[in-house]
Image (cartoon, grey):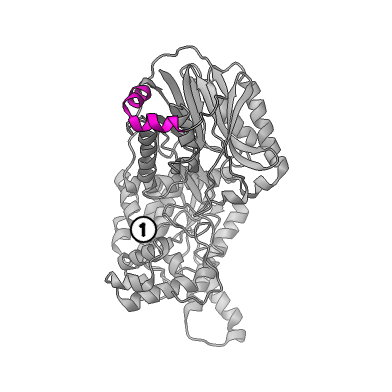
Amino acid sequence: MLNVTLAQVNPVVGDIEGNVEKIRESVARCEDTSHLIVFPELVVSGYFPEDLLLRIDFVRKCMEAVEELAKSLKDAKSLVVVGAPFYGGDLYNSLYLLYGGEVVGVYHKGRLPNYSVFDEKRYFREGEDPLLVELNGIKLGFSICEDIWYPDHLERLSVLSGAEVIVNINASPYHIGKHEFREGFVRARAEDNICFVLYANLVGGHDELVFDGRSMVVDPLGRVVGRAKSFEEDLLTLSIDVDKVRRRRLLDLRWRNASREIDPFPVEASIELPDKPYVEPRLEESPSEEEEVYRAVVLGTHDYVVKNGFSKVVIGLSGGMDSSLTACIATDALGADKVLGVFMPSRFSSKESFEDAKTLADNLGIEFHTVPIDEVYVAYHDELLPVLGEIEFDTADENIQARIRANILFYISNKLGHLVLSTSNKSESATGYTTIYGDMSGGFAPLKDLYKTTIYKLARYRNSLSPVIPERVFQKPPSAELRPNQTDQDTLPPYEVLDEILKMYLEDNVSPEDIVKKGYDRGTVFKVVKMVRRAEYKRKQAPVGVKVTSRAFGKDWRMPITNRYER
């Protein structure tokens, strides 16, 4: 038996000392029960350091921290695996093995992702060699994140050289549906290679990325035998019976023939540790999709606020769904005492909107204030009358209201040190149905990657926990309330239609013509695509927010602003 721990922790980018201390604390908690303790990818530096990696002083501090960590764990009763950058003539994304006060092995990541939100080829060189060590007579192979996506890469050489357990460290960011896909290919690698796979994943938020954890242990039959918690730190310890691998390999002629066809790689180090008590496996259940997305946004919001040194947030409450859900997320992420809601009515705001905003604030227990904007709006109009003359009420008058509200929120932010949370969502941002320097402004945008239809689903989920959002907010037509009797559908298609068109166009790269062929009105489709293209300059100036879809605005969407391709 081999006792293993997947240490699913939440590091902070650049906080090298804090991250190392978190590693030490985790080792102290489980070294008595575990032979092998595995931490995630780049846990020492935090993921992802981006251009900090181009500073040799930063990389050296990371490497020095690993050496000091190894020395401080001299008497630890476990082999410890950590991720950190490595510089040796070039820069690598690396895995370090720590035992007996020393670094006893280093593995360099072989496959570097350079798609979606990843830019690893900008920073790292690809590793070329497997790493094998022996722990209590059991051969271990190692890999980092992307390596495991390739069936015939260094991991394959490791198992054909005798590795019975593959240790794979990860910083795999979350998006909807990714966990099932991720678990599927990890199971396939374990079954194909007839080995145990230890998949240790990061947890926590970093800028627009959020990591869901759900580290797992998969046996040689492709069965998940251990799974850590989702969206929170966890130490998953269990005993694995490596004889399962040996028995199955004796029965598999393909593996035996393949292993004869290579020159085995040597074992880098051999370590002997005393027997430890058997630990029953733990298999945490994954949440439903609505709970999963909600928890992702709550975690991403919490970590952005806290890791950047803010203590409280301020939100403009309108009595509508977007600001209501934003307030729920902020309260669940930070606590009611850390959230300030401000209702800023104009002549177009309804009595019902005030009632709904106030009821929400009372239900959540957050601080609430009303700051009317009508006199400020009139002052704008009067001061600019000599410049503009008497011009009929139009979009400029609508937008100035949103900008006055943003100015008030940022004034409060500057005075009190609260971070402004934007309430703009993906459907609005995609189509430009949001005011630049107005409602889209903020220090962070929790709803940035949430379509309007998803927001209603998440609000229903949140109300299933405790009914804090008034029912009337679900029933009334969405409206910016910037002119009399205004609704969103005056400008936009119904959200049920709009969001499906946006998903196809933004996430799946389906052409407008092909969307029309799926049964959508041609005029509607091309109107939406035109709105998406015209709003690109706005999105480039939007705050960051949590990525939850397969393709989010931000690092994952890199369209030119100046662009005459109409489709």
* Residue type, label 1: Asp
Q: Residue furthest right?
A: 57
Where is residue 134? Give x, y as percent. 51, 21
Q: Is residue 389 above or below residue 99?
A: below
Which is nearer the eye, 7 or 217? 217
Could you tell me if residue 558 is visible in this image?
yes
Residue at screen point 66% across, 27% down: 67
Which is nearer the eye, 159 or 431? 159
Residue at screen point 52% across, 49% down: 113
Q: Is residue 416 above or below residue 262?
A: below
Pick the quarter of the image with the N terminus: top left
Q: Secondary structure at mark 1?
A: helix
Q: Residue furthest left?
A: 519
Q: Which residues make up the magenta segment?
A: 244-261
Where is residue 179? Give x, y as percent. 38, 43
Q: Is residue 421 above or below residue 499?
A: above
Q: Which residue is mark 1?
A: 356
From the image, give the main secondary structure of the stretch colored magenta: helix
Q: Is residue 491 magenta?
A: no
Q: Quadrant of residue 218?
A: top left
Q: Quadrant of residue 149?
A: top left
Pick the quarter of the image with the C terminus: bottom left
Q: Is residue 245 magenta?
A: yes
Which is nearer the eye, 316 or 197? 197
Q: Is residue 243 above or below residue 371?
A: above
Which is nearer the eye, 48 or 402? 48
> Is 296 displayed left or right of 558 in the figure?
left
Residue at screen point 70% across, 45% down: 55
Where is residue 288? Give x, y as percent. 31, 44
